[in-house]
Amino acid sequence: MHLFGIETEYGITREDLDAVDPVEESMELVRAHLPGKFERRWDYRGEDPHEDARGFRVSGLQQDKEEDDFAKVDAHRPFSFHEMKSDLVLPNGARFYNDHTHPEYSTPECRTLKDLLAHDRAGERIVQRAADRRNQQLGGAHVQLYKNNTDFHGHSYGCHDNYLVSRSLPFAQLVSGLLPFLVSRQLVAGAGKVGMEAQESGFVPGPFQLSQRADFMEAELGVDTMHNRPILNTRDEPHADPTKYRRLHLILGDANMCEYATALKVGTTRLVLDLLQRGIVPNLELEQPVAAIKQLSRDPDLKTTVRLKDGRTISGLAIQEEYWNAVSRCCAGSDPDADWVLREWQETLGVLRQDRTQLVGKLDWVTKQWLLETFMREERLAWEDPWLASLDLEYHNVNPDRGLYLGLEAEGKTWRMTSERDVAQALVAGPSDTRGGLRGLCVRRFPEQITGMQWERVQFAGGLRARTLEMGDLFEPDAVQACAALLEAAASPADALAAWTRRKDG
Amino acid sequence: MRYMLMPERREAPGDPMPKPSGPSEEGGGPRRPETGSPDKDNLLKRMRKVDPKQAERYRQRTGE
C-alpha cells in the first residue's frame, strides 16, 4: 500500500511595504483564490498534534520566545481562528490555507510519483494564481511567494512529506531504520543554501551548503515542529484508522523546485519504508545524527564522513549506497515507480561521485550552486556577498516572470517530469485512485451540501442526522474507484452514501 | 567545485513518469532538457535584476 503527499508552507512578502503582517497577508492571499465569500468547512476535530508515536501524549508544543510574543498579539486580532486559517478544500482534493502565518498547499493523497509531481506543480500554480489576483486588488505586483524554507534571519518554515505506514511496523524499528537514510537524503533532495543560520540566531553569510533545513534540526526525535525540530517527527496523527495505520510525517525536507529531486526524495523514502516493512534494517547507527545532518549539509564536496556507533566512519554517499543496495535486493520489480527510482537513484549517486554538472536541472542544490557560481564569476563576488542570499531566495520565487528556477525551466534547461496536460488535470481533479480524488469529487459534485471536511471524512447535511463519507480505511484503488462511480452517478450525497453502504455490506 | 558549462544531457528517464520525448507540442514536458549551454545571457540578466538587499529585507515568522 503506497500513499503519500506533500505539504508546502510558502514564504510570503509585500514589496510595497516596509513592515509586512504575515497573518493578514497569508489570509488575504488564500481568500484571493475564492470567487465568493469564505465559508468555514474544515473540521479540526481530527487534528491533534500532541499524541506521540512513542506512546505518550505531550501537554504542549514548544515555540520560541519570539513566536510566543507574536501569539499574544494574534490573540487580539479582530479575526476568529477560522477566519485567520481561511481553510479551503479545493476541487482537486488539496487543502489550501494559512498555516502558522504561511500560505500552505497540501497536495491530495497520491499513489504514484507522477501524480504527486503533477499535484505539487499544481500547488505552485494555484498559490501564484492567488498572488496574481491579490496583486490585481492591490494594483501592482507587490506580493511575491517563495517555495523555500528560510528567511535568512533564523526563521524556517516547512515542506513536509507524508507516508501511510502500517501500524504493524514497530515504531522503534522505523526510527532505527530511517535515521541514517534521512540524515543523508539531502544529498539528492537538498535545495541548497547560501550561508548558515539557526533558530533565533542571525544569518552568517558564507559558503554554500546542501540543505535549507539542516541548520534547523535540533533533535533526533520529537513531536515538535516549530522549535527544537527533530529529524524524525513523532507526531502520531494518522488521519486514518489508528489501529491499522501510522502517518509518517517528515519535517526535515527542503521544498524542491526540481521535479526530479521531488521524485527522488519521495520515491527513495517510499522504498526505504518498503524495506523496513519487510523487516530489513540496514546495519547503520549514527553516533550523533543531529551533528551529522549539519556536517553533511555543510560539505558540498561530499567528502565529509560521520561516525557510526560501532566506530566506523562513513560518507553521506556511502550511507545512501548502503540503502540503495538493501532496497534493490528486496524491492526491484515490485512496481514501475520502484524500478524507476532504483535506476535513477543509483545513477544519481554515481554521478555525484564524478561529474555532478550532469545533475544541473535535476537536483536543486547542484542547480543553485551552478547558477550562483556562474554569477559569482561574472560579477566577481565572494560567497559572503549579500547579493548571493538574495539570488538564493529568488531561485524559489514561484512568479514565472521572476523566479530563477522557473527562468531556467522556461529555457528548457531542467528535467520536466510532468506535462502541462498533467498539471492542468491536477488543477481540477485529484488522483482517480485515492481518497484525495474522492474528496475533490465531493467538492465538485455537492459543494452546497458539505458541512465539514477533514483528511479522513466528508460530512454532508441531510435530514436529521449528518451523513458522512468515512475514508479512514478507504485506500484500495478498486474501492476508491467504485465509490467515485457512485458519487458521480448519484443525484444527492444521501443517495451516494446509501449505495456505498449497500456495496460495502453486500 | 567549478561549473563551466551546462552539462551534456542524456535521455530523460523512461516509464512510469517521463516519456523519452522532446519538448511536447502542448507547451510543456515531459521533455528532456536541451543539450548544450544555457542561454546564459537571459538568465544572468534575470539574476542581475535581483536586488542585492532583497534577502536582508525578507522577514518571515517561524513556521513548521
Image (cartoon, coloured by chain):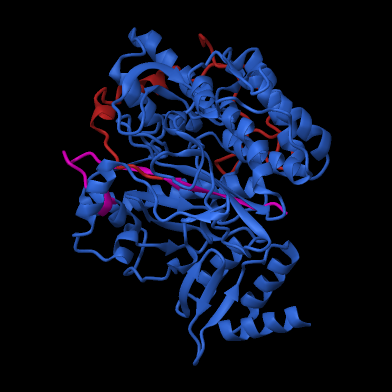
Residue A161 left/right relative to A482: left
Residue depicted at x 39% and y 15%: A375
Question: Relative to B16, is A371 above or below?
Answer: above
The x and y percentages for residue A447 are: 47, 75
- Asked if residue A333 can be seen in this view, the reply is yes
Q: Which chain is blue?
A: A
Residue depicted at x 60% and y 16%: A356
Q: Which residues are magenta?
A: A1-25
Name the one closer to the observer, A419 or A123: A123
The x and y percentages for residue A295 are: 51, 20
The x and y percentages for residue A45 are: 46, 68
Question: Relative to A436, is B44 above or below?
Answer: above
Q: Which chain is red?
A: B
Spot the residue most to the left.
A18
Name the one closer to the observer, A74 or A381: A74
Q: Quadrant of the C terminus of chain A?
A: bottom right
Name the one closer to the observer, A234 or A319: A234
- Asked if residue A492 can be seen in this view, the reply is no
